[in-house]
């Protein structure tokens, strides 16, 4: 099956896609490297387009507003019209944001080229109306910002490393891990929260290292019974606890995501990049069996719900797959293969008769 022939729809942002957001009812937002932002409804109709100050890296929607990181700025737009409600410059780059208890939490960092390191980072808190409530500065860069069990968690780099929770007043509570390796990524799933480390370690909220892989953990997907880790080496490793379930090697992984089910098992989507050629791989989450693999432009942004997944590509394309159509195309492919097998067997019989 050609993966791109089974898309539910394809749209164009007009520039390299750097962030996507998929609403539960199917609406799509896509942001680009030059600040373009577009919003399509669930049927693919373009509702509006807007222009933000710089590259968009994170998009999040709540209460009729869309919040975005754009270069040095946090920007809020009306989700229905695309009109800008407010914008605030931060100190250094706006790295990520999270919407938590009717507030916008944003992380910024200042990078020093001479020292090749981050000098200072900060967590900012804004109301949904754009009022800045407080800013909490720190020496560590928070590489992870995510909600879990009614708390907001930060995965930290050097010097402290470990992770911190942050409350509504900006107070930090630091938790040490049993490794001093910086946290590079994180993921949560219902009763599980995991952190990936630069030394290949994967730890839990108790700070306990569950397993140490051969290279730095770049991306994590938490599953009901374990996790799927994407390593700097290009390896994909699925584990239940510390037991390896499946392992796939290849080019560098740019992004990964779990999505809708196929034959009662969730699918796993991964983008790879060789340096000149991209590829999208779709696997069975449980077994690691490859369902389809197709060459592509470079992909660094994915978003999914239980019925759809959207991917944004360097060539400007925004591609959406829908569960029912994906299943139909796979079923047709399997049917065609069986027809080809029967045809081939019949041809072999005819050749055998002719040779007598």
Image (spheres, grey):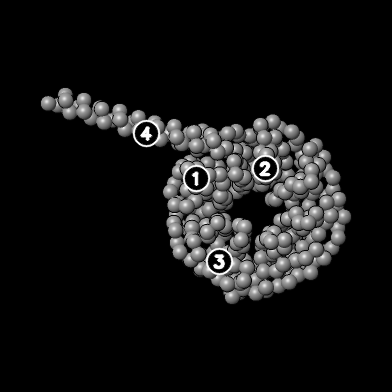
Distance, label 4 to label 2, CA atoms, is 35 Å
In which quadrant will I find the N terminus? top left
Structural crowding at the residue carrying mark 3, measured as other residues with C-alpha within 10 Å and reported as few (<14), some (14–19) or many (≥20): many
Distance, label 1 to label 4, CA atoms, is 22 Å
Instruction: Give the mark nearer the N terminus: 1 vs 3.
Output: 3
Tell me whether the residue at label 2 lies in contact with that at label 1, contact meaning CB atoms closer than 8 angstroms.
no
Front disc: 2 or 1: 1
Instruction: Give the mark nearer the N terminus: 2 vs 3.
Output: 2
Quadrant of res 199: bottom right
Q: Which residue is mark 3?
A: 202
**In the depicted structure, whether residue 298 falls above or below residue 324:** below
Instruction: Give the mark nearer the N terminus: 2 vs 1.
Output: 2
Q: Nearer the viewer, residue 293 or 43?
A: 43
Q: Nearer the viewer, residue 310 or 297?
A: 310
Q: Residue at x 54, y 64 (%)?
A: 216
Front disc: 2 or 3: 2
Q: Is residue 55 something that shows in the picture? A: no
Structural crowding at the residue carrying mark 2, measured as other residues with C-alpha within 10 Å and reported as few (<14), some (14–19) or many (≥20): few
Percent position of residue 148, x then y: 68, 60
Report whether 205 appears left or right of 65: left
Q: Which mark is residue 24?
A: 2
Percent position of residue 214, x then y: 48, 66
In which quadrant will I find the C terminus? top left
Q: Which residue is mark 4?
A: 337
Report whether 1 appears left or right of 189: left
Q: Which residue is mark 1?
A: 264
Q: Residue at x 74, y 46 (%)?
A: 61
Structural crowding at the residue carrying mark 4, measured as other residues with C-alpha within 10 Å and reported as few (<14), some (14–19) or many (≥20): few
Report whether 333 appears left or right of 43: left
């Amino acid at each position: 099956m050609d993966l791109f022939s089974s898309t539910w729809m394809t749209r164009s942002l007009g520039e390299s896609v750097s962030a996507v957001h998929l609403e539960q009812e199917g609406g799509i937002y896509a942001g680009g490297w030059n600040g373009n932002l577009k919003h399509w409804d669930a049927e693919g109709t373009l509702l509006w387009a807007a222009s933000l100050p710089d590259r968009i890296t994170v998009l999040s929607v709540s209460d009729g507003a869309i919040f975005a990181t754009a270069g040095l700025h946090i920007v809020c737009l009306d989700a229905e019209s695309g009109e800008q409600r407010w914008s605030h410059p931060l100190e250094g780059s706006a790295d990520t944001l999270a919407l938590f208890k009717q507030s916008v939490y944003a992380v910024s960092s200042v990078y020093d080229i001479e020292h090749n390191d981050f000098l200072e980072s900060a967590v900012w808190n804004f109301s949904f109306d754009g009022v800045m409530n407080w800013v909490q500065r720190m020496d560590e860069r928070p590489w992870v910002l995510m909600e879990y069990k009614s708390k907001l968690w930060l995965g930290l780099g050097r010097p402290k490393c470990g992770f911190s929770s942050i409350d509504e007043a900006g107070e930090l509570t630091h938790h040490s891990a049993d490794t001093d390796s910086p946290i590079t990524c994180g993921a949560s799933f219902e009763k599980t929260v995991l952190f990936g480390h630069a030394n290949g370690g994967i730890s839990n909220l108790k700070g306990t290292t569950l397993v140490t892989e051969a290279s730095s953990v770049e991306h994590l997907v938490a599953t009901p019974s374990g996790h799927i880790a994407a390593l700097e080496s290009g390896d994909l490793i699925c584990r239940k606890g510390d037991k390896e379930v499946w392992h796939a090697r290849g080019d560098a992984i740019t992004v990964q995501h779990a999505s809708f089910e196929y034959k009662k098992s969730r699918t796993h989507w991964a983008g790879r990049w060789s340096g000149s050629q991209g590829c999208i791989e779709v696997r069975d989450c449980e077994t690691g069996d490859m369902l389809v693999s197709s060459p592509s432009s470079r992909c660094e942004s994915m978003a999914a719900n239980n019925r759809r997944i959207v991917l944004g590509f360097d060539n400007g394309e925004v591609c959406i797959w829908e569960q029912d159509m994906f299943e139909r195309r796979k079923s047709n492919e399997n049917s065609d293969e069986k027809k080809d097998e029967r045809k081939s067997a019949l041809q072999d019989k005819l050749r055998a008769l002719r040779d007598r």
